[in-house]
Amino acid sequence: MSILVTGGAGYIGGHMVLALLDAGEKVVVLDNLSTGFRWAIPPGAVFVEGDVGDRALVAEILAKHGIEAIAHFAAKIVVPESVIDPLAYYLNNAAKARDLIDCAVKAGIKQFIFSSTAAIYGEPSVSPILEDVVPAPINPYGRSKLMVEWMLADADRAYGLSTVVLRYFNVAGADPRGRLGQSSPVATHLIKIAVQAALGHRNGMEVFGTDYPTPDGSCVRDYIQVTDLVAAHLQALAYLRAGGKSITCNCGYGRGLSVLEIVDVVKSVSGVDFPVRIVGRREGDPPSLIADATRVREVLGWHPRHEDVRGMVKQAMDWERRLHNVGSPNGDELSYTHP
Ligand code: UDP
């Protein structure tokens, strides 16, 4: 039996593939390479280039490879982009997920792990956030992910598809063994942007707003290291295999760090005092998102090991340096073994 990892050529999906192979699992990757990289797929995984919305292809994969469980990572993930082009998000993240779930149900698959997001919470009035807070996303990205959560809950009730929904807070860092990291050529998230500024790959950076109702006025997020995040997925798989019922878990550490604190860490780890411009707020940004991570620890038995934010930043920096020095602009010339 194999695990199907959609989006397995991407950042988080790619780390999941490594973790599954490390654990001795058989893995099939389905990725359309829109943002992922062929070189990121290790030799031990079967790779199928294609789209999760291609029903014929998905049905063929499920039958041919004897898929036991699906871990669905493939998605668009950039909040501001979702504000500019919401229908692309509803197509990629919601409509295509619906097709994937339909194929899974028709193939008799009973286990599904879904990459959701803290963005489904919107601007919660409580902190840290419990999973039971009523979702109220404030951007199309969050809404597109919430739609899939609803589909999965209904699919469980109607067809018995057991699902672990993992709501990611802010994912950062890279494989501690240096095999993979965040590789998209254009940085869209804070730590990668700050790291590029430190390495001189961009001329400084901007902080989007210091007038939020937070201790230092900049937005607060719960940054979770990518290997720790992926470990929660392996726990989820074990939980489903043991007959666990559908469940939704936050994935974070329960610790908030502000944008300005992250900038300071990146400056300190790199030793570079890069220019930082304070500018206006970015649309769609909630002031603070911190996980209550009790459930993932207690129910899934998750034990994070990489909570140190300096370590996360150092991993991101090492990977970025390697990508910049060895890779082509689109990263495609990086080989898996010699990135
Ligand atoms: N941010 C920033 N400058 C940047 C990129 C991000 O100030 O160049 C802020 C952003 O406004 C948010 C936080 O950093 O408050 C985290 O943003 P990111 O895009 O990394 O993740 P999100 O929380 O939106 O998923």
Image: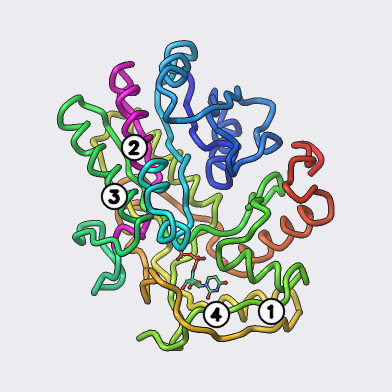
Tell which circle, 3 or 1, labels the residue nearer the N-terminal end: 3
Q: Residues within 10 Å of mark 1 (few under 14, many from 20)?
A: some
What's the distance in space between the residues labelled 2 and 3, CA to CA? 12 Å
The location of residue 280, given as percent across then percent down, is: 48, 83
Q: Nearer the viewer, mark 4 or mark 1?
A: 4
The location of residue 211, given as percent across then percent down, is: 42, 88
Which numbered marker is on residue 267? 1
Is the CB of mark 2 within 8 Å of ligand 1? no
Is the CB of mark 4 within 8 Å of ligand 1? yes
Give the structural element (helix, strand or loop) at label 2: helix
Which residue is at 31% across, 70% downward? 128
What is the three-letter code of the residue carrying label 3? Leu
What's the distance in space between the residues labelled 3 and 1, CA to CA? 36 Å
Give the structural element (helix, strand or loop) at label 4: strand
Tell which circle, 4 or 1, labels the residue nearer the N-terminal end: 4
Which numbered marker is on residue 95? 2
Bounds of the magenta segment: 94-121
Which numbered marker is on residue 207? 4
Q: Which residue is mark 3?
A: 146
